[in-house]
Amino acid sequence: MKTINENLTVEVIKEMGEEIDLYRLTNPMWCTVNIYGTYEEYLKSAKDFTAEQRYLLALQWYAAETDNGGHHQLFFNSTGIVWKDTLEAFKLFGIDNLYNNLLEVIEFFGGDVSFDRKQRWDMLSKAEEKDEEALYDFLDKHDRFFYENEDIDDKLIDYIKNNPEKFVFIGTYKTDED
């Protein structure tokens, strides 16, 4: 376990210029925010971060899971806990096409998805039992839309450059790195 001392001030973020380092901005959160417990534990573990930082992390989780195994994997895994923050992120960062895509997926499941992983498993199982082919056709369509439109870094970087004060982190965090 290694302790990292990070000083992401407004000035440091501005000095990044056109090459905003999304990894550096999100790393304190990757190492701190708990997506494996309850929604309350998730929010508590993110309390030292701004909503914008939490939304940026949610987008990173969403992209990682959806790139790897689609929306089914997102909801199946612990990362499904970030679905609502991902919607808020798409809205905040002006990524309307992906907001609408994810909203359609949420509406497919009744307009609300549980933050509890076991309840999401039940949701997926019930949808598979009802009509497995229809479920996977629907999810595949929305996965493909994400893959074709996932280049979101420009909008994120523009937002961060225009609002660096919302991404400040000054403190320490622990990482598994040696």
Image (spheres, rainbow, N blue to C red):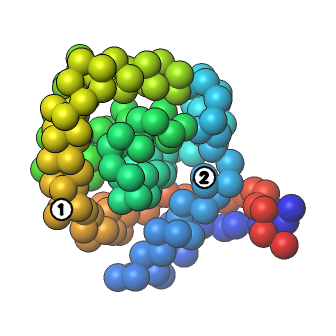
Image height of 11 relative to 19, above or below: above
Image height of 67 relative to 51, above or below: below
The mark nearer the N terminus, 2 or 1, is 2
Local crowd size for mark 1, using a 10 Å CA cut-off: few (<14), some (14–19), many (≥20): few
Local crowd size for mark 2, using a 10 Å CA cut-off: few (<14), some (14–19), many (≥20): many
Q: Quadrant of residue 18?
A: bottom left
Q: Look at the numbered disc 2 and give the secondary structure of its residue.
A: helix
Residue 47 visible in this rendered orientation of the protein: no
Q: Residue 118: horizontal and vertical position, in percent?
A: 53, 22
Residue 7 in the figure: left or right of residue 17? right
Give 22 or 122, whichever is nearer the viewer: 122
How many discs mark residues in the rendered view? 2
Indicate which disc residue 29 carries.
2
Residue in the image at 30% along x and 20% along y: 129
Q: Quadrant of the N terminus?
A: bottom right
Give 42 or 73, whichever is nearer the viewer: 73
Residue in the image at 63% along x and 36% along y: 36
Q: Residue 153: horizontal and vertical position, in percent?
A: 31, 68
Q: Quadrant of residue 35?
A: top right
Residue 34 in the figure: left or right of residue 96? right
Residue 153 visible in this rendered orientation of the protein: yes
Type of the residue with mark 2: Met
Q: Residue 81: horizontal and vertical position, in percent?
A: 48, 33
State if disc 1 and disc 2 touch (CB < 8 Å).
no
Q: Look at the numbered disc 1 and give the secondary structure of its residue.
A: helix
Residue in the image at 47% along x and 81% along y: 15
Type of the residue with mark 1: Asn
Of circles 2 and 1, which is in front? 1
Q: Residue 80: horizontal and vertical position, in percent?
A: 45, 36
Q: Which residue is mark 1?
A: 149
